[in-house]
Amino acid sequence: MANVVVVGAQWGDEGKGKIVDWLSERADVIARFQGGHNAGHTLVIDGQVYKLNALPSGVVRGGKLSVIGNGVVLDPWHLVSEIAKIREQGVEISPETLMVAENTPLILPLHGELDRAREEAAAKGTKIGTTGRGIGPCYEDKVGRRAIRVADLADRATLEARVDRALTHHNALRAGLGLEPVDRDGLIAKLEEIAPEILQYAAPVWKVLTEKRKAGKRILFEGAQGSLLDIDFGTYPFVTSSNVIAGQAATGVGIGPGSIDFVLGIVKAYTTRVGEGPFPTELTDETGERLGERGREFGVVTGRKRRCGWFDAALVRQTCAVSGVNGIALTKLDVLDGFDTLKICVGYELDGERLDYLPTASDQQARCTPVYEEMPGWSESTEGARSWADLPANAIKYVRHIEELIDCPVALLSTSPEREDTILVTDPFED
Ligand code: GDP
Ligand code: IMO
Ligand code: MG
C-alpha cells in the first residue's frame, strides 16, 4: 500500500493535471485537499483536451473514486456545470465515482463579488491579481466560523440560520465597498435549488478514506496551485488563501500524516507566475516572450498571459524542503529546445549579501536579484521523448544539474502535454 501526494513546487501551472492523470492509473482514489475552482488543470489524451477546475484529474480514467475533501472551497454551481461539461466529453460521473466531503465550505456568489470588489478597490501595488472566484473570502468565512458547508444544505432551518449569520458579516462589509446588501431569500432559494445536486455526492470522506486505507487501496492526493502561493510559505500577501504544501493533504481530507508515503513535487523546467507579486527570475524581454510562446503560457481559468522566467533552483530547493518532497516530476523540458544558453538561478543578492533562499519579507523578495549559472542548451527536439535514450546529452546534463541544485531526484519527466509522453524513472507508488 502506498499513498502519494502531488504538490506544485513553483507558482502553480507546473503540469500537475497531466501528472496526476498519468499516475491515476496506479491509484484507486484521487483526492483534492485544498483550493477550489481557481485551479485549472489540463489533461491531453490522444489529442482530446480536458480542463478541470474543481474535479480531481483522476475523473477522466473512469473506475476510480474521485474525492473533493474538506480542505477545498466548493462553488456548487460551478461544480454542477463542470460535471455537465465533462460529461459532454464522454466522462462518466456518478455518486459511485465522485464524493464531496460533508464538511466542505461553500463558495457563494457573494464571495466572488467581494473578491472582485476588493481587487478593483485596491491601491496601486496592493492588487493580488486573484482569479476573482471568491476563494479568499470563502476561506475567511471558514476560519471566521460563518461558512455554509455542504452538510448544511440538508436542513432548511440550519441553512437559514447559517445564511443569516453570514449576511450579518457580509452586508456590513458590502456597505463599506458600495455593494448592495445580499438578497437573503433569493440566496436561500438558490441554495435549496442546488442542494439535491450536491447532496447526492456528500459523504463523510474521512471515514470512507479510512476504510479504503484499511482495504489496502492507494490514494493519490492532488494539490492545486503551487508552494510559492501557499498562505504561510508563499510570497505573502501575493498568495492564495490556503495551505497548498504536502502537510495540508492530511488535514484536507482527514487522514493521519503517517499515511503519506511519497511526496511528488511538480516542477516546470523554467518558471511561470500568473498574478501579481515578486518573481526574481522573471524575463520581460524576448527570451521571456519566447518561453511564453513555446510553452503556450496562458492561464486556464482567467486566460491571462503568464509571466515567464528562468528556472529558479534556490526557490525549488526551498519548496521541496517545506513539503518534504521525495522526488520531482520535471515538466515542459521540450519548451527549452533550441535555446543556445540556459540560465539557472542558484541564489540571490540582496543589499550586497549573498542568500541561498528567498527571504520572507515582501519588500526584500522584490529587491532580490538572481545569481545565475549558465549551461549550454541543445538544438535537438525533446518533444514527445519517452525514454532517456531519446534525450540529447545537454538536456540530460540540465536535468541532472537541477537534481543536484535542488537536492532531490527526478522521478518523472514530461516532454509534451500528451499523457503518454512521460518518462518514468521511479514509481512513486512503489518507492
Ligand atoms: P496545472 O495547473 O499544474 O495542472 O498546469 P496547467 O494545466 O495549468 O498548465 C500546464 C500546461 O502545460 C498545460 O497546457 C499542459 O497541457 C501543458 N503541459 C504539461 N506538461 C507538458 C510538457 O511536458 N510539455 C509541454 N509542452 N506542455 C506540457
Ligand atoms: P493551478 O492549480 C496559478 C494565483 C492567482 C493569484 C493568487 C491568488 O492551476 O496551478 P486566488 O484566486 O487563489 O485568491 O488568487 O493565486 N493562483 C494561481 N496561479 N495556478 C493556479 O492554480 C492558481 N490558483 C491561484 O493568479 O496570483
Ligand atoms: Mg493550472
Image (cartoon, grey):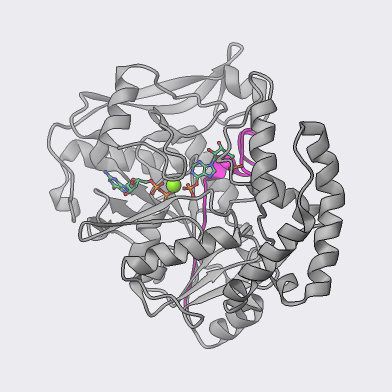
373, 106: nearer the viewer: 106
Q: Viewed as shown, does residue 57 lie left or right of 33?
A: left
Q: Is residue 202 visible?
A: yes
Query: Residue 114, relative to residue 367: is it above or below?
Result: below
Magenta: main secondary structure: loop
Q: Is residue 427 visible?
A: no
Residue 87 pos. (x, y %)? 37, 69
Q: Viewed as shown, does residue 145 lie left or right of 417?
A: right
Q: Viewed as shown, does residue 381 lie left or right of 278?
A: left
Residue 185 pos. (x, y %)? 77, 60
Identify the residue at horizontal 65%, vertical 51% (top origin): 109
> Where's the C terminus, which quadrant?
bottom left
323, 211: nearer the viewer: 211
Identify the residue at horizontal 30%, vertical 43% (top origin): 332
The residue most toward the top is: 352
- Counting the numbered discs, the total is 0
- Residue 89: image quadrant is bottom left
Q: Viewed as shown, does residue 251 lie left or right of 329?
A: right
288, 181: nearer the viewer: 181
Residue 149 pos. (x, y %)? 72, 66
Query: Residue 22, relative to residue 323: is it above or below?
Result: below
First to last magenta residue range: 218-240
- Based on the picture, tell me whether residue 227 belongs to the magenta stretch: yes
The residue most toward the bottom is: 215
Identify the residue at horizontal 82%, vertical 63% (top origin): 162
Identify the residue at horizontal 77%, vertical 32% (top origin): 178
Query: Residue 97, relative to residue 82: is it above or below?
Result: below
Residue 336 pos. (x, y %)? 25, 34
- Residue 292: image quadrant is top left
- Based on the picture, tell me whether residue 387 belongs to the magenta stretch: no
